[in-house]
Amino acid sequence: MAKYRKLGRTSAQRKALLRNQVTALIANGRIITTESKAKEVQKIAEGLIALAVKEKDNFDTVTVTAKVARKDKDGKRVKQIINKETGDVLADTNRDKDGKLLHFENGITVPVYDEVQKEIKKDQPSRLHARRQMMKVLYPVTEATPGVKGKKKATKEVDLVQKLFDEIAPKYVNRKGGYTRIIKIAQRKGDGALEVVLELV
């Protein structure tokens, strides 16, 4: 007897289908699919959530010093002109009062950086391994940002692995399995397959 449903697909197609549906379930909290697909997706999703619950607090907080480009009131980088040979500052800005670019002999324009202290989470080896296992299953997801114009600016990438650790895992700390539920809806019109809702509890 097979340990998994073949779902009438080749192994590559089946793997892509299941990865896609698990990603949709984690991103949206619920999906509508057929019963046989839902049972396969449920196995994978519950494994990922159990991994996230186990490793959610397994990190160290480290303070690091980072260089961040200084920005003006318009959000543009502040630049200064320095001497190419000596490294002395010739001008604090690269533009005059009228907004025209300044030119100096032996002068080059460089951005100004400030040093900032940041606290970052450094994963322990077991949490890092869990993160990589999750990344093998989950596809990258982009989300539309409302009210922003432009093709690239209007979308942002969602870190589903971080969502598993920070949002989903804390809800299930005191729960021993059973993180998802299947609710039967009705038979599909076209082929009569039983449709279900698979959702996070």
Image (cartoon, rainbow, N blue to C red):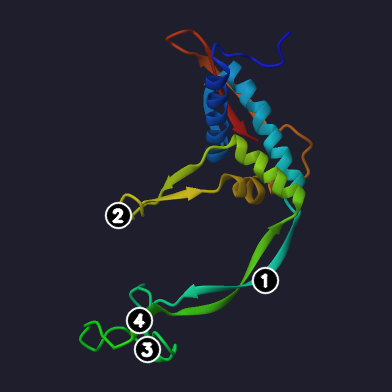
**Disc on the earlier residue, 2 or 1:** 1
Amino acid at pointer 4: Ile
Which disc, if any, is residue 149?
A: 2
Q: Which residue is mark 3?
A: 92
The residue labelled by disc 4 is 108
Q: Position of residue 43 (x, y in %)?
A: 68, 26
Say what amino acid the circle numbered 3 marks. Asp
Q: Height in image: 199 above or below 107?
A: above
Alpha carbon separation for disc pair 2 and 1: 35 Å
Disc 3 crowd, CA 10 A, few/some/many (<14, 14-19, 20+): few
Q: Residue at x 49, y 8 (%)?
A: 192
- Circles 1, 4 touching at the beta carbon (< 8 Å): no
- The percent position of residue 22, horizontal first and vertical second, equals 58, 32
Helix, strand or loop at label 3? It is: loop
- What x and y, as percent, mark residue 83? 38, 88
> Which quarter of the image is occupied by the N terminus?
top right
Residue designated by label 1: 63
- Amino acid type indicated by mark 2: Lys
Query: Closer to us: mark 2 or mark 3?
Result: 3
